[in-house]
Image (tube, rainbow, N blue to C red):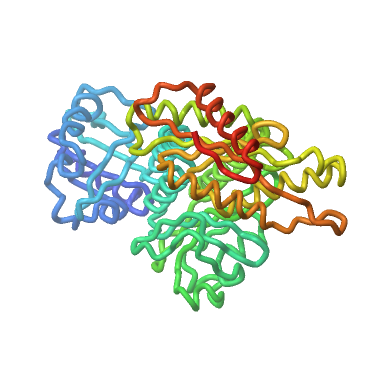
Amino acid sequence: MQNFEMIQKLLSQMLGQIDDIILFADDQRRITYMNDSAVKAFGFPREELIGQQTRLLYANSDEFVHQGEERFSKDAKPESEGKVIRYRRSNGTFFYGETIGGPIKGPDSDDLFMFGLIRDVSRRVTAEHMLQKLHTITSSRNLGFDERIDELLKLGCSHFGLPIGIFSRIEGGNYVVQRACHPEDLLEPGLSFSLSDTYCDHVYKADCVQAFHHVASSEIRNHPCYANFNLEAYIGAPVIVDGERYGTFNFSSPDPVPPFTAQDIELVRLIALWAGHEVARANDINALQEAHQALENIAITDPLTGLYNRRHAQQVLDDNIAALATAEVDHPLCVALLDFDHFKKINDKHGHDAGDLALQHLSVLAEEILLPGDTLARWGGEEFLAILPNSLLSDSATRINLLRQRMKESVVEYEGQRLPLSLSIGLTCLESDDSATREQLIARADKAMYAAKEAGRNCLKML
C-alpha cells in the first residue's frame, strides 16, 4: 500500500495541470485522486468524490458495471483505443468522454489501482449526431421544403445553443426573413430589414461563414445589429443557388456562448449548402410544373379567345353530368349554344381580323357576366358552348340572356366602323332524373339555337 500511495503521489504531481480528466481509484473503484480538470468537468467538490465509487460519474449505472467487467478489473487487459462514454455532471447535465485506462499493478507488490484518462469529446459526438439528424431531415420524403427548413432551424438552434434561427433571402440591400425559429415567434416570413443592420452583412461581404461568440468583446461591437437588437452571439453562412448568392442561414442569441469550433463552422456551412441545393431544386421543380401547366393550358385553351376549347368543354360537361347523376348537386345542369348572327357577312365585309375581334369580345363579356362556376368554351367557328352547373333554368336564362343583350348593345369598331353583333342562343336543362347523354344534351341545345335563328335571330330559345 505504501508503494501505491507513493506512485499515486508522483503521478498526481505530474498530471495535475493536464487539461484532460485524470482519475485514480482503488481496486474497488473508489476514487482516490482527481485532477483539477476532473473537478471542473464533473462539477463535484473534490472532497465529495474522494472515497466514492466512480459509479456516481456514469450517466448509466449499467455502463459502470460493463466498464468494470471489460476495463477496470484486476484481470482486464490494457486497451489502446478509447471508448466514448456518457458521464454525468453534478448539475444533472451530461457530457461525452473518450476514455482510456485500466488496472495498474505495482512491480514489486500486489498493490492494484485503477487509472482513467477522459477527454471531453462532447462537441465531436454532438456534431456526429447532428450530421445524422441533418441527413435524416434532408433525405425525408415526408417533409416539404418549408418543413425541412424549419426542422433544420430547430436543429441548429439546439446544437449551437442559440435560440434564434433564420433562413433569409437577400435582394439588393434588403434582408427578408423566409423561415425563422424564435422562442417568442417574433420573426414572421416576409419580415424585412436593411442588410446593413444585420450581422449577415458581414457574411455577404466575406462570402463565407462568419461567427462571433461574444460580440461585445469583438471587432463588430459597434455594429448596428448589436445596438438595435443586443445580439451577443452569431454564426451564419451564405446560401448559394446556382452559383449566385441567395441569402443566409444563421443563428444568434442575446447571450454570449463559448467560442465556436471548426466543426461548428463546417456544420453551418453544410446546412447552408444543402439549403442552396434545395432552393435550386425547388426552382427547377417549380419551373417544370409551370411549364407542364402551361402545356396543359395550351392543350385546353382556344388561342384566339382565351376560352376553353371543345375538348375541354366535353370533359367539363361529362363531369357535371356525372355529378348530377350521383346527386352531388341540388339543382339542374343547364347548357346553352351561342352562335353569332351573320358572322360570315362580318368576315366578308370587314375581314377576318374584324371577325376575330367579335369573338374575343364575347370572352370579355362572359368574364363580366357569368359566374365563377360557369364555363364558356369555343365549340367551333363562331359557335360557343356555355355550361352552367347547379343552376335553375330561370337563373341560367337570366345570365345567358344578359350576355346576349350586352353583345347587341356593344360598340365594337374595326377601322372606324361599328360591327353589327348579335347572338342566337339555345338553352336546355338536364334534371337529375333525365338520362340524356352529352351528345343528346348538346343536340337539344342545338335544336333550341336553330329555333332562335328561325325566330329572327338575336334571341334566346329554351327546350
- 53 sits left or right of 306 in the view: left
Q: Nearer the viewer, residue 28 or 463?
A: 463
| Visible residue check, residue 284 | no
Identity of the residue drawn at 55% across and 27% down: 442
Q: Is residue 216 shown above or below 403?
A: below
Q: Nearer the viewer, residue 284 or 18?
A: 284
Q: Is residue 121 shown above or below 189?
A: above
Residue 59 point in image, percent of width and height:
21, 41
Residue 89 point in image, percent of width and height:
23, 50
Q: Nearer the viewer, residue 111 or 63?
A: 63
Identity of the residue drawn at 58% across and 57% down: 169
Residue 190 point in image, percent of width and height:
51, 61
Residue 26 occupies quadrant: top left
Residue 20 point in image, percent of width and height:
36, 47
Identity of the residue drawn at 56% across and 33% down: 448
Outermost residue toward the front in this view: 455
- 204 sits left or right of 180 in the view: right
- Counting the numbered discs, the total is 0
Residue 46 occupies quadrant: bottom left
| Visible residue check, residue 268 | yes
Q: Is residue 347 shown above or below 398?
A: above
Q: In which quarter of the image is the N terminus?
A: top left
Residue 450 occupies quadrant: top right
